[in-house]
Image (cartoon, rainbow, N blue to C red):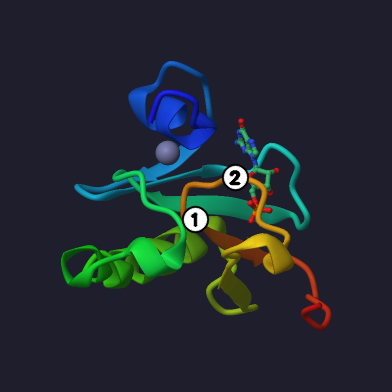
Amino acid sequence: MADCVFCKIIDKTIPADIVFEGDNVIAFRDINPKAPVHVVIIPKKHINPLEDMDEEDIVMIPEIYMAARTIAADEGIDVSGYRVLTNTGPDSGQEVEHMHWHLLGGRLLGDIG
Ligand code: 5GP
Ligand code: ZN
């Protein structure tokens, strides 16, 4: 999508520190990290919000979690632990309207909310 910052990262028209790339997902370091490890994992297909993921899109979710596991191991936080979460819609505080999953770790994470 033309005005989507994450689509531009996928197209490599804007730079990002990409840490993982698979057939259907790509992951890069968050520009404003909330933890020592803060990676954003996104589907290469522009989808938003979660409700717009149809049955075909949903099969991509396991790839998100497999990418999270791979990145967590690469970053050395697989044993210490980490959080994978997504925001969707206004009340969640979602800023970028391209579905994405945050991978956070490297410190003790507090309660959500
Ligand atoms: P949200 O609040 O929508 O769940 O999270 C969006 C995340 O994307 C934020 O943590 C924000 O820092 C990150 N972000 C926004 N724009 C960019 C960008 O251009 N590059 C990178 N690497 N991260 C971005
Ligand atoms: Zn997009």
For this orientation, the residue located farthest to the top is 13
Number of other residues with Cα within 10 Å of mark 2, as a class: few under 14, some 14 to 19, many 20 or more: few
The foreground one among 13 and 18 is 13
Amino acid type of the residue that numbered disc 1 sits on in the rendered structure: His
Measuring 31% from the left and 64% from the top, which residue is drawn there?
Answer: 53
Measuring 58% from the left and 60% from the top, which residue is drawn there?
Answer: 102
Give the vertical position of 38 relative to 45 (above or below). below
Number of other residues with Cα within 10 Å of mark 1, as a class: few under 14, some 14 to 19, many 20 or more: many
**Closer to us: mark 1 or mark 2?**
2
Image spot of residue 77 (x, y percent):
59, 68
Q: Respond yes or no on whether mark 2 lies under 8 Å from ligand 1.
A: yes
Answer left or right for 46 relative to 59. right
Q: Respond yes or no on whether mark 1 lies under 8 Å from ligand 1.
A: yes
Question: Would you name the residue on which mark 2 appears?
Answer: 96
Answer left or right for 27 relative to 43. right
Amino acid type of the residue that numbered disc 2 sits on in the rendered structure: Val
Residues marked 1 and 2 touching at CB (< 8 Å): yes
Q: In the rendered view of the protein, which quadrant contains the N terminus?
A: top left
Question: Would you name the residue on which mark 1 appears?
Answer: 100
